[in-house]
Image (spheres, grey):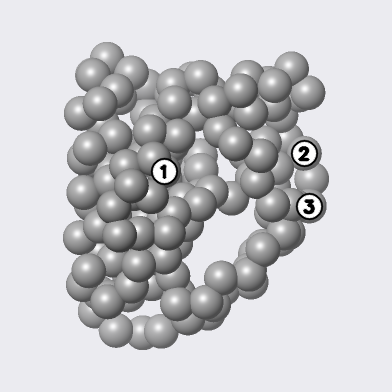
Amino acid sequence: MKVLVFYTNRFAYKTAEQNLSDEELKIIYQEIPPIKRQDERMDCITAFIQVEAEDEERDLKSREKKLANHLKWVARKNNCSDILLHSFAHLSASKASLEFTAKLFNATLKRLNNGDYRASLTPFGFFLDLDMEAPGFSMARVWGDL
């Protein structure tokens, strides 16, 4: 799993173009609760996440725990409790199945929201128009190979 995390003063998105079929979207949204087609977040951790095929060979729980712990660590370093997960299939050539990715994101959201974090997810299955303001300091950008 590859993760590129930004601390963002402001992160906004709106759906632009659907890139999964309606059948694929049904698979995803059985696992992930319906989400906003556009949103704006202030003072949040924005995580661009690429779940890889190798992740499916491991235990889902171990992958979810590793991802959640990494995101919590970055959030603590930035004194922030709002975390936004964004599926970003451009950090690696290896891709996990939609089903596994949805399960991993859902489990990670539950873990974060059961803690002291407000976690949510950008829409799966859509290209997004993004508007992001990220400050330039050391812990504002963190890359991980989990």
Residue 141 location (% of width, % of height): 32, 69
Q: Secondary structure at mark 1?
A: helix
Q: Secondary structure at mark 2?
A: strand
Instruction: Report the amino acid beneath label 2.
Output: Gln
Instruction: Report the amino acid beneath label 1.
Output: Leu
Say above or below: 114 vs 52.
below
- Quadrant for the N terminus, please: top left
- Quadrant for the C terminus, please: top left
Say above or below: 126 vs 39.
above
Please give the residue where the numbered disc 1 appears in the rendered image.
Answer: 109
Residue 7 location (% of width, % of height): 38, 72
* Circle number at residue 16: 3
Q: Nearer the viewer, residue 107 or 126?
A: 107
Tag 1 and tag 2, C-beta contact below 8 Å: no
Please give the residue where the numbered disc 2 appears in the rendered image.
Answer: 18
Q: Secondary structure at mark 3?
A: strand
Instruction: Report the amino acid beneath label 3.
Output: Ala
Say above or below: 23 vs 46.
above
